[in-house]
C-alpha cells in the first residue's frame, strides 16, 4: 500500500471541484440505483454547498487527487465532518484514514473538542470507517432528509 499525501485545498480549485462532483455523483447514483446526471449533481451542490467549510483537504498517492474531506464548525467546540470521499479505484489504500486523520488534527488545532457527522444507511463502507476510528452513533442532531445515522467522536 502506497502512503497518501493529504493537503489543504481551496474548495473552488479545479481538482477540488472535480473530486466533489465525483463524490456527489457517487452518492446520488447509490441512492437512485443508476448513474447521476450532471443536473442532479448541480442541484446537490446548490442544496448543500461546500463553500462554508472551515478547512477542506484533498489527497492521493501521487500527483492525482484521489479523495477529499473537510469540516465546518457548528459551534466553537464542535466540527462537522463533510465530503469524505475516496475515488473507487483508490479505495482500500488508506485514503479514508489519511483524510479522516487530517481533518481531526486540523479541527483540534482550531479548538474542536468533538466532531460529528451524518450519513446514510447504504454508505456501509463509510459507517465502518467511522466506527473503526472511534466514532459512536448518537441521537439525531439534524433533520437532513438523507441522514439515517448520526455519529460523534470526542477529540
Image: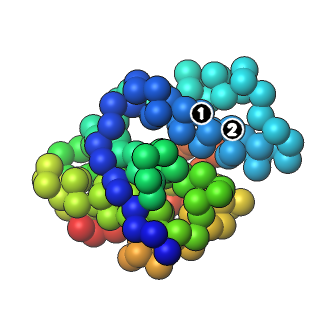
| Residue 23 left/right relative to 136 | right
Determine which residue is flagged by label 1.
21
Q: Is 153 drawn above or below residue 31 in the view shown?
A: below
Q: Residue at x 65, y 56 (%)?
A: 88
Q: Does residue 141 appear in this view?
A: no
Q: Does residue 78 appear in this view?
A: yes
Label count reads 2
Residue 54 shows which numbered tag?
none
Q: Is 16 drawn above or below residue 83 in the view shown?
A: above
Question: Horizontal and vertical percent for residue 50?
Answer: 44, 31
Q: Residue at x 85, y 47 (%)?
A: 33
Q: Is 90 drawn above or below residue 64 in the view shown?
A: below
Q: Residue at x 56, y 26 (%)?
A: 45
C-alpha span from label 1 to label 2: 6 Å
Quarter of the image with the C terminus in it? bottom left
Query: Residue pushed farthest front?
Result: 63
Determine which residue is flagged by label 2.
25
* Element type at mark 1: helix
Please state which of residues 102 and 63 is positioned toward the viewer in this rendering: 63
Please state which of residues 130 and 151 is positioned toward the viewer in this rendering: 130
Question: Horizontal and vertical percent for residue 61?
Answer: 45, 58
Question: Horizontal and vertical percent for residue 123?
Answer: 65, 60
Amino acid at each position: 500500500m502506497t502512503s497518501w499525501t493529504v493537503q489543504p485545498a481551496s474548495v473552488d480549485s479545479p481538482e477540488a471541484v472535480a473530486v466533489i462532483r465525483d463524490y456527489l455523483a457517487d452518492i446520488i447514483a447509490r441512492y437512485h440505483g443508476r448513474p447521476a446526471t450532471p443536473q442532479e449533481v448541480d442541484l446537490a451542490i446548490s442544496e448543500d454547498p461546500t463553500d462554508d467549510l472551515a478547512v477542506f483537504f484533498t489527497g492521493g498517492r501521487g500527483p492525482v487527487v484521489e479523495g477529499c474531506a473537510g469540516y465546518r464548525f457548528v459551534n466553537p467546540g464542535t466540527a462537522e465532518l463533510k465530503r469524505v470521499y475516496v475515488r473507487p479505484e483508490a479505495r482500500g489504500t488508506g485514503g479514508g484514514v489519511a483524510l479522516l486523520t487530517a481533518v481531526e488534527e486540523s479541527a483540534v488545532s482550531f479548538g474542536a473538542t468533538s466532531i460529528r457527522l451524518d450519513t446514510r444507511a447504504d454508505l456501509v463502507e463509510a459507517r465502518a470507517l467511522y466506527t473503526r476510528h472511534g466514532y459512536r452513533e448518537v441521537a439525531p442532531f439534524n433533520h437532513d432528509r438523507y441522514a439515517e445515522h448520526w455519529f460523534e467522536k470526542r477529540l
